[in-house]
């Protein structure tokens, strides 16, 4: 997989959502946040959400920041691009690390874990199977998703990447 | 709840943070045996996404020594640096040996100790200046932030964006913009790639906005 940035290589920032079709790469950097990749193989349609917090508690904006708003919004954007085609989505998720875990007060310490649980719950509600995951730990991740194939490669500093 | 500071509050706080950083560099100069200077940009409130680039490009590898701050203001304080700047700092401390090429326990310990010294000096100056600037003499209703207590620093070498995500979580849970000041360090008049970042949590931002009214 191409590690460098290209024109069809888009970076998804904190609380961002991007949807792409047919070709290109979507990238994001993850610490305690969750990277959610939804993919439809037939339409070669891929959505990536960089989710920060588990629950909007009614705030709602920005929609990509919270699990309970980001998941339906990513699906909505993908359905919009699909223009009526029925989507059979699968999900891959990565992130949720506890960086500097020993410095965290109990409330912060659980955010990575809370994000993971909330994403799994939201995907279950939408009946989207999780086909790959790389979660937890104490180090950051660089995630690269291939729009055409749905392949996701997760890079770490100082060790080999893995394929989801 | 008030989560943002107005222009006047930002200017006042910027002055206090800049002076605290200058005082902290005196300790750093003594510790390193070199002339260390710092320039501090005015504080700015920026989006979460923009803030993740405060330490460098999102996928840049950086080193950071991070302390959690408790007391009158809570949050995180960290000293970050790229590999060459960080290892050069260690070489300056650990004299009479070959220059370091990697981070061993010795270099990590030196970086953490440096952060402890500059961090404690910064927080002490911050608390003192805050009291002097905003406490009416003899008033019991002093607008003090009180003492600030840091934990021992922890070292990490990771993606810049991943480290910033951890630091921003305390603010991100409540607000969509964060308060940030960028620093520019010079050692013997040569710029070095160090950053000192103080990131108060959301309740502390609220406290600051009330005290600075």
Image (cartoon, coloured by chain):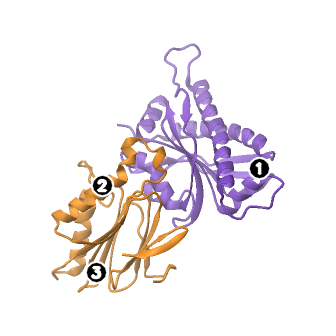
Q: Is residue B181 left or right of residue B213?
A: right
The chain to which mark 2 is attached is A
Relative image position of residue B161 (x, y in whole percent): 49, 61
User: For residue A61, which numbered disc appears in the image?
Assistant: 2
Residues at marks 1 and 2, CA–CA distance in whole angstroms: 48 Å
Relative image position of residue B90 (x, y in whole percent): 73, 53
**Residue at 73% across, 43% down:** B28
Relative image position of residue A163 (x, y in whole percent): 40, 77
Contact between marks 1 and 3 (CB within 8 A): the answer is: no
Q: Can you tell which of label 1 and label 2 is closer to the viewer?
A: 1
- Mark 3 or 2, nearer chain start: 3
Q: What SS does tag 2 mark? A: loop
- Tell me what hue chain B is rendered in: purple
The quadrant holding residue B151 is top right
The answer to whether residue A103 is seen in the rendering is: yes
The residue to which callout 1 is attached is B93
The quadrant holding residue A86 is bottom left
**Residue at 45% across, 35% down:** B209
The residue to which callout 3 is attached is A45
């Amino acid at each position: 997989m191409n590690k460098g940035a290209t024109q069809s290589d888009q970076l998804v920032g904190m609380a961002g959502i991007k949807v792409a079709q047919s070709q290109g790469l979507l990238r994001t950097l993850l610490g305690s946040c969750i990277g959610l990749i939804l993919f439809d193989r037939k339409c070669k349609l891929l959505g990536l959400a960089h989710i920060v917090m588990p629950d909007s508690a009614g705030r709602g904006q920005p929609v990509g920041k919270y699990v309970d708003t980001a998941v339906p919004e990513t699906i909505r954007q993908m359905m919009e691009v699909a223009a009526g085609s029925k989507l059979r989505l699968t999900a891959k998720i990565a992130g949720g690390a506890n960086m500097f875990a020993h410095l965290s007060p109990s409330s912060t310490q659980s955010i990575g874990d809370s994000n993971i649980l909330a994403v799994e719950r939201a995907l279950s509600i939408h009946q989207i199977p999780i086909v790959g995951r790389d979660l937890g730990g104490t180090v950051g991740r660089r995630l690269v998703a291939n729009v055409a194939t749905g392949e996701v490669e997760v890079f770490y500093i100082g060790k080999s990447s893995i394929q989801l | 709840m008030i989560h943002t500071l107005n222009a006047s509050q930002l200017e006042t706080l910027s002055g206090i943070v800049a002076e605290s950083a200058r005082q902290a560099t005196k300790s750093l100069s003594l510790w390193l045996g070199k002339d260390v200077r710092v320039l501090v940009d005015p504080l700015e409130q920026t989006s979460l996404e923009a803030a993740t680039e405060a330490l460098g490009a999102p996928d840049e590898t950086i080193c950071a020594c991070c302390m959690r701050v408790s007391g009158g203001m809570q949050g995180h304080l960290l000293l970050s640096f790229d590999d060459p700047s960080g290892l050069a700092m260690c070489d300056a401390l650990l004299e009479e040996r070959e220059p370091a090429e990697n981070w061993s326990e010795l270099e990590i310990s030196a970086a953490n100790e440096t952060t402890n010294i500059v961090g404690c000096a910064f927080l002490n100056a911050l608390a003192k200046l805050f009291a002097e600037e905003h406490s009416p003499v003899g008033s019991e209703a002093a607008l003090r932030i009180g003492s600030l207590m840091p934990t021992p620093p922890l070292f990490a070498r990771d993606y810049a964006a991943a480290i910033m995500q951890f630091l921003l979580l305390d603010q991100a849970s409540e607000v969509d913009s964060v308060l940030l000041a960028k620093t520019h360090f010079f050692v013997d008049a040569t710029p070095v790639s160090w950053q000192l970042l103080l990131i108060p949590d959301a309740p502390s931002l609220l406290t600051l906005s009330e005290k600075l009214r």
